[in-house]
Image (spheres, helix red, strand yellow):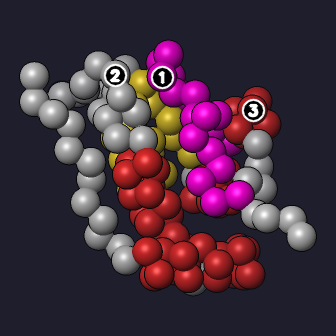
Amino acid sequence: MMPVMPPRRRIPVAQGSAAVSQWRDLGSQTPRVVLATAIRATLEELGLRCPGRSTEVRVPPFGAVQCIEGPIHRRGTPANVVETDGATWLALVVGDLPWADAVASGAVRTSGTRADLTAYLPLFPVEVP
């Protein structure tokens, strides 16, 4: 069995952090290029923190990442899929939206036994002074 290689970082950490901060400040007024950078950077971060290929997290049209240890998916539709829109993904990433609420509302669609990201989100919780 070949070892699972984590995805390489394509977006520098500082650039990704700045994009997430700008999204937090501007919300729905965030320029599309900044939104795309924030989403892609956070997907990369998830892949680095939770290496594996058992689950695919999709945020169309911006990107997707395979993550979480377990059975490796090679071709076709993965058994474990998480899919959501960009604003929902970023709200989950920073802790503005609890995972259970996003799933219950239908803002996040999941399939498979490894599609629960509760243990991995938020990636960047907002610290309350």
The earlier-in-sequence mark between 2 and 3 is 2
Q: Secondary structure at mark 2?
A: loop
Q: Disc 1, disc 2: CB below 8 Å?
A: yes
Mark 3 Cα within 10 Å, few/some/many (few <14, many 20+)? Answer: few
Most extreme residue toward the top is 113
Query: Which disc, if any, is residue 114?
Result: 1
Residue 11 in sight: yes
Residue named by callout 2: 70
Horizontal side of residue 75 vs 67, given as left or right: left
Place residue 90 in its image quadrant. bottom right
Instruction: Give the magenta-colored segment's residue range.
Output: 106-125
Q: Residue at x 71, y 74 (%)?
A: 24
Horizontal side of residue 4 vs 91, given as left or right: left
Q: Secondary structure at mark 1?
A: loop
Can you tell which of label 1 and label 2 is closer to the viewer? 2
Mark 2 Cα within 10 Å, few/some/many (few <14, many 20+)? Answer: few
- Image quarter hosting the C terminus: bottom right
The earlier-in-sequence mark between 1 and 2 is 2
Place residue 74 in its image quadrant. top left
Residue 28, position as x, y percentages in the image: 71, 73
- Image quarter hosting the N terminus: top left
- Magenta highlight on residue 23: no
Residue 79, position as x, y percentages in the image: 37, 20
Horizontal side of residue 50 vs 107, given as left or right: left
User: What secondary structure prevails in the magenta region?
Assistant: loop
Instruction: Give the camera-side residue of 48 and 114.
Output: 48
Q: The residue under label 3 is which amino acid type?
A: Ala
Query: Which disc, if any, is residue 100?
Result: 3
